[in-house]
Image (tube, helix red, strand yellow):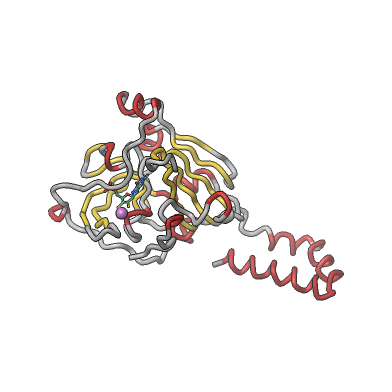
Amino acid sequence: MKRIGRAGFLALVGTSALAGCASIATNLTENESFHRVLELPERLNLAVLGSGQPLAREYSDSAISPVFRHNGFDPPSTPDYISWSRKAWHGYRLFVTGLVETPKSYDLDTLRRSFPRVAQTTRHDCVEGWSVIGKWTGVVLRDVLADCSPKPQAKYVVFHCMDQDPGGEAYYESLDMHQAAHPQALLAYELNDRPIPIENGAPIRLKVPTQLGYKSAKYVQRIEVVAGLGGMYGNGGYWEDQGYEWFAGI
Ligand SMILES: Nc1nc2c(c(=O)[nH]1)N[C@H]1C(S)=C(S)[C@@H](COP(=O)(O)O)O[C@H]1N2
Ligand SMILES: [Mo]
């Protein structure tokens, strides 16, 4: 909320400059305390951003579907992926890049040890018309993002995946900061108390139970924080580029 206020304020300063009030705008921006206001917040408070959002229903473990279906492209077939999968994911790293103060990468052990372990039993709804209930365990996405300190101009989070369609086009997805700060948006490493099977997106997948299945990117390799979509990010996702809605709330 604060950020919108600040952007609006900046827009206002810009408009008055255009309207011939350049000197007032200059005087304002030269004022030190005005600068301090402009620079607030230094970084996004993801906990505040994520609080108060509606939660997806969580189920008891007895509701877990006997089989969690899988769907989408074939698992990644790169030599790296195949070799990591045979070595309990030793060598794999999850990267966080883009508009963050401290870009980082994490191996699975570090992710498990450095962040609280969180589980959710939620329903996965695919646009094709099927649903399954599964228990996902992992780390809260916003905890990992906060660890890298998104810059104030950060607006979206893009998930780059390791799999591709038959034509070689990589799967990707995106959330805005608000969705990324949702307390149930997980970077999951377990499904139903076991490491995520390859078919379901090993070793790390996004699980966003408040949105349709295609938003929950599997095989995540890199999380990129950006100021806007469009351009090289198309409509913000592989399926969005084929005409699906970017906002897929349920
Ligand atoms: N990387 C990647 N993520 C993906 C997909 C995919 O093909 N590749 N398919 C999406 C769709 S349409 C659905 S319904 C779910 C399927 O997840 P599941 O295979 O664990 O059931 O993953 C989503 N995330
Ligand atoms: Mo789907």
Q: Where is residue 190 in the image (x, y as percent from the top left)?
A: 27, 41
Residue 181 seen from this side: no
Q: Residue furthest right?
A: 23
Q: Where is residue 237 in the image (x, y as percent from the top left)?
A: 45, 53
Which of the two residues, 154 or 30, is positioned nearer the viewer here?
A: 154
- 96 versus 227 height, above or below: above
* Quarter holding ligand 2: bottom left
Please give left or right for residue 95 compared with residue 34 in the image.
left
The residue shown at (35%, 44%) is 218
The residue shown at (37%, 26%) is 90
- 156 versus 52 height, above or below: above
Residue 93 seen from this side: yes
Q: Which residue lies furthest to the front in this view?
A: 167
Quadrant for residue 26, please give it.
bottom right
The residue shown at (64%, 59%) is 40
Quadrant for residue 221, please give it.
top left
Which corner quadrant holds the C terminus? bottom left
Q: Position of residue 115 (x, y in %)?
A: 39, 42
Q: Position of residue 178 (x, y in %)?
A: 47, 60
Which of the two residues, 175 or 102, is positioned nearer the viewer here?
A: 175
- 212 versus 85 height, above or below: below
Quadrant for residue 240, please give it.
bottom left
The residue shown at (16%, 47%) is 67
Please give left or right for residue 243 compared with residue 135 in the image.
right
